Image (tube, grey):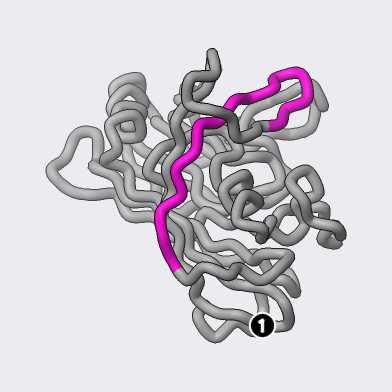
Amino acid sequence: MDLNVLHCCNHVLGVVKPAGLPVVPDDSGDLSLLELAKAFLKREFKKPGEVFLGVVHRLDRPVSGVVCFGRTSKGAARLSESFRGGSAEKTYVAVTARPLAESEGVIEHWLLKDTTRNTVRVVEPETPGAKRAETRFRRLEDRRGQSLVRLSPITGRSHQLRVAMASLGAPLSGDLRYGAEEPLPDRSVALHALSLELPHPTRPEAVSLCAPLPQLPVWRGWREL
């Protein structure tokens, strides 16, 4: 599998994750994006031995789009701090399985993860273990009973965007786990990490990454894309 590289410098590697590929190795034993990226660096720079690559954020396996790694321990630590501190600006696009009624707004929830089932649900704020999640959304276009939506997560919780859209009665297309009735042909979820902008870990400039949309029917024909 070829790796789509968006940015590569001494401290940062930005790549495109295809839907269905895990960011890191998991129990499935399937090839991961991390392994692909390490193989690219080893081959590209003729590095002997083990290649360092720090994981600073993740996307759900059925989600596609921009993923950023740290190529050095310093780079990884500072990139991770950008995500924790809120200076990483993330923009997603999504296609819903049912039309979204609201045109725009901010969704605030308290989420609790069931690690056994790998699902997340909305709970009361005082629930032990619950984490606050906040997401901005804007409906861009409607077509044939679906909506194209832009999503900007303010926090970074597991399954945050998927649960947010489901809570509005508009689960993401293909997201059987959170309310969609039909799968997409490749078993993906119609959620794409379109762009990411964050401070460069060692230089006074920004790293700006943008991932092309998957070549699937669910993403075709929208005027706003």
Front residue of 168 and 62: 168
Element assignment for label 1: strand
Residue 188 part of the magenta-drawn span: no
Front residue of 93 and 125: 125
Q: Amino acid at mark 1?
A: Arg
Write the residue at 77% across / 57% down.
Answer: 174
In the image, the segment drawn in magenta is 104-119
Q: Is residue 94 left or right of residue 224?
A: right
For this orientation, the residue located farthest to the top is 128
Residue 111 part of the magenta-drawn span: yes
Q: Is residue 132 left or right of residue 161?
A: left
Front residue of 188 and 180: 180
For this orientation, the residue located farthest to the left is 204
Residue under numbered circle 1? 143
Residue 86: x and y in percent read: 29, 38
For the question of whether residue 118 can be seen, the reply is: yes
Write the residue at 58% across / 70% down.
Answer: 101
